[in-house]
Amino acid sequence: MAKEPEQIFQPFTARHLEALRKLVGADRVLADDDANGAEALETYSHDFTEDLRFKPSVAVLARSAEEVSKVLAFATRERIPVTPRGAGTGLSGAALPVRGGIVLSLGKMNRILEIDTDNLMAVVEPGVITEVLQNAVAEKGLFYPPDPASRGSCMLGGNLSHCAGGPRAVKYGVTKDYVYGVEAVLPTGEIVRHGGKLLKNSTGYNLTQLLIGSEGTLAVITKIFLKLIPMPTRKSLVLAPFDSLEKPAAAVAALFQAGLTPSACEYMEREALEAGCRQTSEPNPFPNATAMLLLEVDGFSDAEIDRQLETLSTVLERFGAADMALADSPERAERLWRIRRSIGEAVKTRAVYKEEDTVVPRFVLPELLKRVKSICAEYGVASVCYGHAGDGNLHVNLLKENLSDDAWNSELPKCITRIFEAVRDLGGTVSGEHGVGYVQRRYLPIVYGPAELALMRAIKRAFDPAGILNPDKTLP
Ligand SMILES: Cc1cc2nc3c(=O)[nH]c(=O)nc-3n(C[C@H](O)[C@H](O)[C@H](O)COP(=O)(O)OP(=O)(O)OC[C@H]3O[C@@H](n4cnc5c(N)ncnc54)[C@H](O)[C@@H]3O)c2cc1C
């Protein structure tokens, strides 16, 4: 089987620090030799993945593709590992500098270069915060749908690198469905371009899509072409309670069979909703429900919304959700969304945890839920599940709670392996949107065989012969 690129790195020395300061300017190279630098390195040593920490030797704040090119060519020559970094909100440890070396921050490349209202395209640098682009295009009546719950802080380069999704994916798709071109810098320093404001392109290998989801292991993205669509003018939000864990997921399949595509279709079990309500100090609208669906419909006329709400209530009633709450104002809808968006953080404050980002075909989601609960019971691990039911994407939070350290450390990997085997058997895979990064790569052989893994390693070698770019990520 083909091996990973050789990863023999040089220790980072004072000579390297001086050379980097000459390359891009001393003000944009942060190291331990001053208080600001030391603080920045502390920040760059972690992301939002559990409690992992790896300190880099230095952080470089890039301002242009040319600077990124100089830094990468230098790092390849000197065999120094480089970890690209957006906002550091990742949940799979993909931005952790696990081998030290250089953290290459793209946060200062944060210009919206163009909003092209004729071609419905935006051209952006990778450090633009997702919500900043969404607000800028909304002012022109346009819509950039991918909406990770972290959209107020995560960056478009990070979204592209993980192929981020969010609640709207069910109707509008995920990041890959909007990226039509990129400019990127190879680890050897060459600047490459592929695609652009083109809705069609069958010219050679699709390098744009290859870079999506590549988690900063193949190239550093310096420019992105994004498709925009007209902004729907009406929407309506409903919270529906159910008396079982599985009925909501079954109701979702029935909604699609009835011809309805909601613009969001979120699943929360009781403990997830309770955690979100606690976090936001909101009352729980359905304290006795076992599980809930948060459903949004959108469109361009009141009639369109009414028709969708009618289908929705007819179908949901069949599954026992007669007592639905309709958010009767934009403020009320925003409060419900705030509860939903805060669940991830809220659940994690409850106990030591490990989050899994399972995804299966939508129709088998009820079966996945059943299997997750039964596997967790077998290993004595508590779980709280929520996620994007319309996409078959279930976030499974495994909580340590009363387990001893020994039991948690020995049982958790077995429990996770069993969950992913169940996911695979149901036609699913290891991550729907959070990526593989550092913490999930050991589970990849559950879903990929030797041929797929060898192909991925060959791609990595072709892009990064010295193996300096984001080592120990994505591939097992
Ligand atoms: C509260 C919370 C809620 C979340 N909700 C969602 C959700 O609903 N849906 C979802 O999909 N995710 C969600 N996430 C996860 C996270 O926000 C996303 O994965 C996001 O896309 C990461 O963006 P970032 O800018 O923080 O990237 P980082 O964490 O900084 O980096 C992520 C990866 O991208 C690489 N990278 C970053 N920029 C570049 C670049 N320019 N070129 C090459 N590689 C680069 C890094 O090396 C790393 O591999 C959530 C996270 C939190 C904390």
Image: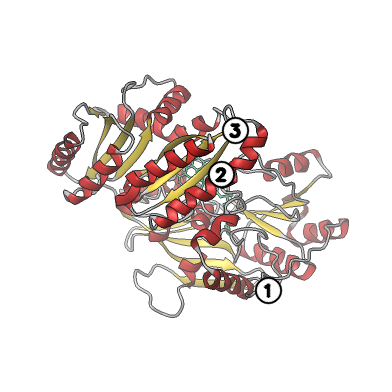
Residue 290 visible in rendering: yes
Q: Is residue 121 above or below residue 269?
A: below
Q: Is residue 191 above or below residue 163?
A: below
Q: Which mark is residue 35?
A: none
Quarter that holds the N terminus: bottom right
- Depth check: give the residue in front, 413 or 143: 413
Q: Is mark 2 within 8 Å of ligand 1?
A: yes
Q: Which residue is mark 2?
A: 89
Picture residue at 66% right of the left edge, 59% below the top = 470
Q: Position of residue 222 (x, y in %)?
A: 56, 61
Q: Is residue 39 left or right of residue 234?
A: right
Quarter that holds the C terminus: bottom right
Q: Is mark 1 within 8 Å of ligand 1?
A: no
Q: Is mark 3 within 8 Å of ligand 1?
A: no
Find residue 60 and report its image quarter: bottom right
Numbered disc 2: secondary structure: loop
Q: Which residue is mark 3?
A: 352
Numbered disc 3: secondary structure: loop
Find residue 22 and report its image quarter: bottom right
In this figure, what is the number of numbered marks? 3
Q: Which mark is residue 465?
A: 1
C-alpha gap between disc 3 and disc 1: 39 Å
Residue type beneath disc 3: Val
Picture residue at 42% right of the left edge, 31% below the top = 272
Residue type beneath disc 1: Pro
